[in-house]
Amino acid sequence: MDDRLADNRAHWEELAALHPDTAFYDVESFLDGESTLRPLEREELGGRVGEGTRLLHLQCHFGLDTLSWARHGADVTGADFSETAVETARDLARETGLAERARFVEGDLYDLPAVLDEAFDVVFTSYGVLNWLPDIEAWADVVGHFLTSGGTFYVAEIHPFSHVLMDLDLVEGRPVPDWSYFGGDPRTYDEDGTYADREAELDDTVTHEWAHGLGEVVTALVDAGLDVEFVREHPFACFEQFPGMEHDEDGYWWLPEAPEDVPLTFSLRARG
Ligand SMILES: C[S@@+](CC[C@H](N)C(=O)[O-])C[C@H]1O[C@@H](n2cnc3c(N)ncnc32)[C@H](O)[C@@H]1O
């Protein structure tokens, strides 16, 4: 494995151990029967997921969204490169009585075609996934590889432009971002804390993230043979991306001074 992906995996191993105990993930409500899926993906994908739908969830973390789709009747496969995440997901599947329709596979996303030999009606991925991937064309090929002809791919994700706003200075009125929208070399961070627990002290703090502009993502999927049905941009975030954001009951975060003005999330649906 590439050293940078190995650093990322060590970091995610640690987060996978921490996250189930955070209020952000609220595992207790999930065990009580609540879905962790947000209204966006339920509205935009839910109509295509029902009894027996074969659904693959890429970068599934510890499986809450995957298992929520199983509660919609789907036969789900979650995949992630964190062993801890996959083991926790399997435990949750057993605990919720969903184990018969849920399986979890450990592996780097790019290696999955060598590990899983089947096709899926739906391929799903969401919120905080693409920035961990060095090669977006190869990612799109993996999506295309697993999708049945006529099947549905769906992603809801942090809007790539919003990454630029997270570290932005103005020099004589001109924007000077710390993060290029257009990608290139990865950004390396060495920080404690996670989006689910800002105060967490970590051992594996070094991570590497890649920028992929919206055009790059859409073009990669088109080049992989998918028919894009829509790309939608939304002014809410899936976590407190900027200090002082306001939280709503659907789990989205809003900029109080500009609730309709800045793209913070995008969603894309395509056919295989
Ligand atoms: C931000 S989390 C996804 C969160 C998910 N939306 C949720 O809230 O449960 C990103 C996930 O991507 C996984 N990941 C990162 N790089 C990966 C790779 N190269 N292959 C497979 N999984 C990867 C991490 O282990 C982590 O579980």
Image: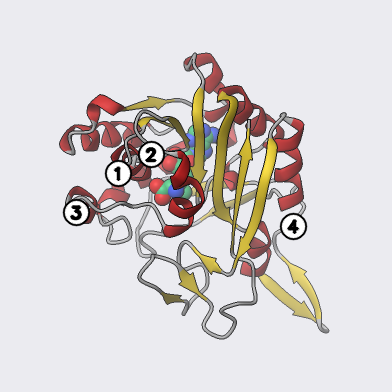
Pointer 3 residue: 28
Residue 130 visible in the shown view? yes
Give the mark, 3 or 2, whose residue is nearer the N terminus: 2
Query: Which numbered mark, 3 or 2, is in the foreground of this view?
Result: 3
Mark 4 and ligand 1: say if the CB distance to the nearest ligand atom is below 8 Å: no
Residue 16 versus residue 7: which sits nearer the camera?
16
Residue 180 marker = 4
Measured in 3D between alpha carbons, the distance from the residue under mark 2 to the one under mark 4, in whole angstroms, is 27 Å
The relative height of residue 204 versus residue 25 in the rendered view (above or below) is above
Q: Residue at x 35, y 61 (%)?
A: 197
The relative height of residue 47 versus residue 261 in the rendered view (above or below) is above
How many marks the image carries: the answer is 4
Measured in 3D between alpha carbons, the distance from the residue under mark 4 to the one under mark 1, in whole angstroms, is 31 Å
Residue 17 marker = 1
SS class of the residue under badge 4?
A: loop
Give the mark, 2 or 4, whose residue is nearer the N terminus: 2
Do labels 1 and 2 touch, CB within 8 Å?
A: yes
Residue 248 position, x and y percent, is 39, 73
Residue type beneath disc 2: Glu
Mark 2 and ligand 1: say if the CB distance to the nearest ligand atom is below 8 Å: yes
SS class of the residue under badge 3?
A: helix
Q: Residue at x 51, y 47 (%)?
A: 206
Residue type beneath disc 3: Glu
Q: Residue at x 31, y 55 (%)?
A: 25
Residue 70 position, x and y percent, is 32, 37
Measured in 3D between alpha carbons, the distance from the residue under mark 4 to the one under mark 3, in whole angstroms, is 39 Å
Measured in 3D between alpha carbons, the distance from the residue under mark 1 to the one under mark 3, in whole angstroms, is 16 Å
Pointer 2 residue: 13
Measured in 3D between alpha carbons, the distance from the residue under mark 3 to the one under mark 2, in whole angstroms, is 21 Å
Q: Quadrant of residue 195?
A: bottom left
